[in-house]
Image (tube, helix red, strand yellow):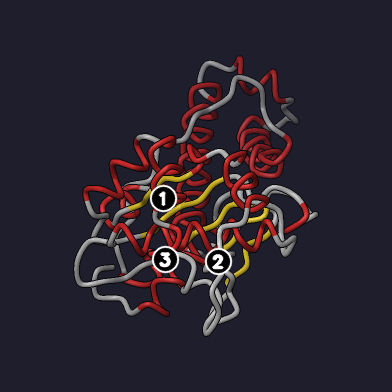
Amino acid sequence: ILALTDDQLEQFVREWTSHKKEYVEVQRFSGPGDKGRDVVGYLTKERHEGPWHNYQCKQYGRTLRTGLGLGEVGKVLYYSHRGEFTAPTRFFFVAPRGLHRDLKRYIAKPSEFKAALVATWDQNCSKTIIEGQVVSLSDVLRAFIDQWDFSAISSISADELVQDPGAKPVLKAWFDVDPGPAPIGVVPEEIKTFELPYIQQLLDAYGEREGQTLAQKDARDHETHGPHMYRQRERFFDADSFARFYRDNTMQEDI
């Protein structure tokens, strides 16, 4: 992950967030017109007219500088204020090498983040939002910033990204990382609809041996066939658990 380019990191994050069930859609923005968005996760079909999460990807040779982090938040809030989109309900800095200690401190203390953004607007935001223009901190924009919840900001490092269960399929696809052993299957007491074809094959085999047709209850209560059926159901659900685990952690649609 540390060796990825800026473009690759954004693509990696897009694929990773696409596996998060909370999002109805994930979109990647790139280039000078991104308005402070790299990867966006929409929580509703209203997309940018509803709640959404912003993933700001920063791949540098060292920790993310405080001024740059403040500037990125300022840019998104400026365009939110302009009505380009609603303000994000979560803002993630995806910085594989982490954040500068002051930026980390601001994130831990949202009120200080807000105060620092306002106090350093001219230094970190005014000349970086729109190329060739100066965006001043008007009273209306200041009021918009004041009402936004700065506790929505957090960061994701390379270590945290690797440990996220949702990243396993992408880590497998990109780096051939072993997703680990599949969990043991859990056998329900009642026979489920999707295992009926398998159960019927067992019943046919038992019936052939006994010379008569056996119902599910007869087979389960049988001195020999009952324990055998349970063992076969254990194997069935172990195989089903493995198939689901492999599909979910290797980006495979069919097993």
Name the spot of residue 195 as percent of width and height, x first. 66, 39
- Callout in the foreground (1, 3): 1
Name the spot of residue 27 as percent of width and height, x first. 62, 67
Look at the image and tell me whether residue 21 can be seen: no
- Please state which amino acid type lies under the numbered disc 1: Ala
How far is disc 1 from disc 2 in space, using C-alphas? 23 Å
Q: Which residue is mark 1?
A: 119
Q: Which residue is mark 2?
A: 37
Contact (Cβ within 8 Å) of mark 1 with mark 2 = no
Tell me the residue at 52%/16% (across/down): 223
What crowding class fits label 1: few (fewer than 14 Cα within 10 Å), some (14-19), or many (20 or more)? few
- Callout in the foreground (1, 2): 1
- Please state which amino acid type lies under the numbered disc 3: Cys
- Please state which amino acid type lies under the numbered disc 2: Arg
How far is disc 1 from disc 3 in space, using C-alphas? 24 Å
Name the spot of residue 23 as percent of width and height, x first. 64, 51
**Which secondary structure, mark 3?**
strand
**Which secondary structure, mark 1?**
helix
Q: Which residue is mark 3?
A: 57
**Which secondary structure, mark 2?**
loop
Nearest to N terminus: mark 1 or mark 3: 3
1 relative to 87, above or below: below
Tell me the residue at 57%/41% (across/down): 146
Name the spot of residue 4 as percent of width and height, x first. 31, 76
